Amino acid sequence: MQRIKKGDKVRVIAGKYATKEGTVLLVNNKKGVAVIEGLNKVKMHRKPNAKQEKGGIQEKEAGIPLCKLALLAPKAPQGISKIKYTINKEGKKVRIAKKTNHPVGSK
């Protein structure tokens, strides 16, 4: 089970973009990567086709391996924390930062 979800704030902890932060746009669990807003941009050469009249060089974000990402937790020292799961009063499963016991999430 992956602890990083779409909409979470994360920090890159290793590689070219180490110490950069951003919001998760997409998580692909099969490939083990997440797309982070504004990070790891690649250029793609596209031909014009029926869907897209204009061709040329386009930029888009590529995936960053999930093992290189740390979830930013509220009120945690240095901003990062591990995650645990608990059941709240309404009976829903919620993610909790281990260091601070505060709920973590995009909602």
Image (spheres, rainbow, N blue to C red):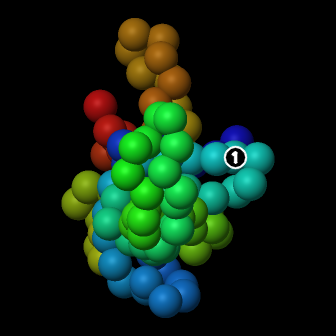
Estimate the x, y position of residue 77 in percent, counting from the top left.
29, 73
Q: Secondary structure at mark 1?
A: loop
Q: Quadrant of residue 73?
A: bottom left
Asked if residue 80 can be seen in this view, the reply is no
Residue at 43% of width from left, 85% of height from top?
Answer: 18
Residue toward you, 86 or 33: 33
Q: How many marks?
A: 1
Q: Position of residue 40 (x, y in %)?
A: 45, 74
Which residue is drawn at the image coordinates 43% and 57% (left, top)? 55
Residue located farthest toward the right when viewing the structure as drawn: 30
Query: Farthest residue toward the left?
Result: 75
Location of residue 19 by image quarter: bottom left
Which residue in the rendered view is the most extreme toward the top? Answer: 90
- Seen at 42% across and 65% down, the residue is 56
Between 11 and 17, the one lying in front of the other is 17
* Left or right: residue 47 compared with residue 54: right
User: Label 1 neighbourhood size at 10 Å, few (<14), some (14-19), many (20+)?
Assistant: few
* Image quarter (top left, top right, bottom left or bottom right) of the N terminus: top right
Judge left or right: residue 22 versus residue 67: left
Q: Nearer the viewer, residue 102 or 8?
A: 8
Can you say whether 54 is above or below 36 in the image? above
Q: Residue at x 48, y 12 (%)?
A: 91
Quarter placement of the C terminus: top left
Q: Which residue is mark 1?
A: 29
26 versus 92 height, above or below: below
Q: Where in the figure is residue 53, as x and y percent of width and height?
A: 40, 44
Given the image, on which type of amino acid does mark 1 rest?
A: Asn
Work out whether residue 89 can be spotted: yes
